[in-house]
Image (tube, rainbow, N blue to C red):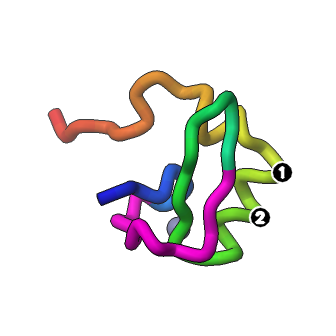
Amino acid sequence: MPIDPVCWMHVERNSEYTAEYNGQKYYFCSLKCKKKIEKAPQKYLGVKSPMKMPE
Ligand SMILES: [Zn+2]
């Protein structure tokens, strides 16, 4: 199941909110998240380990 790179929610593969960056397809839970990434894709996609693990 794809993950929304903005809010880290699981997204249905048939989501209507998708975008492509660097040949990679991304899925979004909502238009709100898609708009966010359109404004600053590197903010969400340029980070190597965006998911912080609790220590
Ligand atoms: Zn989202």
Q: Which residue is mark 2?
A: 35
Across and down, in percent, residue 48 comes to 46, 22
From the viewer's perspective, is 24 left or right of 38? Answer: left
What predominant SS class does the magenta segment belong to? loop
Element type where label 2 sits in the image:
helix
Identify which amino acid the numbered label 1 is placed on. Answer: Lys
From the viewer's perspective, is 6 left or right of 54? Answer: right
Q: Residues within 10 Å of mark 1 (few under 14, many from 20)?
A: few
Query: Which residues are the magenta region?
Result: 8-19
Is 14 colored magenta in this rendering? yes
Residue at point 55%, 50% (across, down): 26
Which label is found at residue 39?
Answer: 1
Is 40 colored magenta in this rendering? no
Relative to 3, does residue 46 appear above or below in the rendering? above
Which label is found at residue 48?
Answer: none
Q: Which quarter of the figure is the C terminus placed in?
A: top left
Identify which amino acid the numbered label 2 is placed on. Answer: Lys
Relative to 13, does residue 55 appear above or below in the rendering? above
Pointer 1 and pointer 2: residues touching (CB < 8 Å)?
yes
Residue at point 60%, 76% (across, down): 16
Q: Which quarter of the figure is the N terminus placed in?
A: bottom left
Across and down, in percent, residue 27 comes to 53, 59
From the viewer's perspective, is 21 left or right of 52? Answer: right
Quarter of image, res 34: bottom right
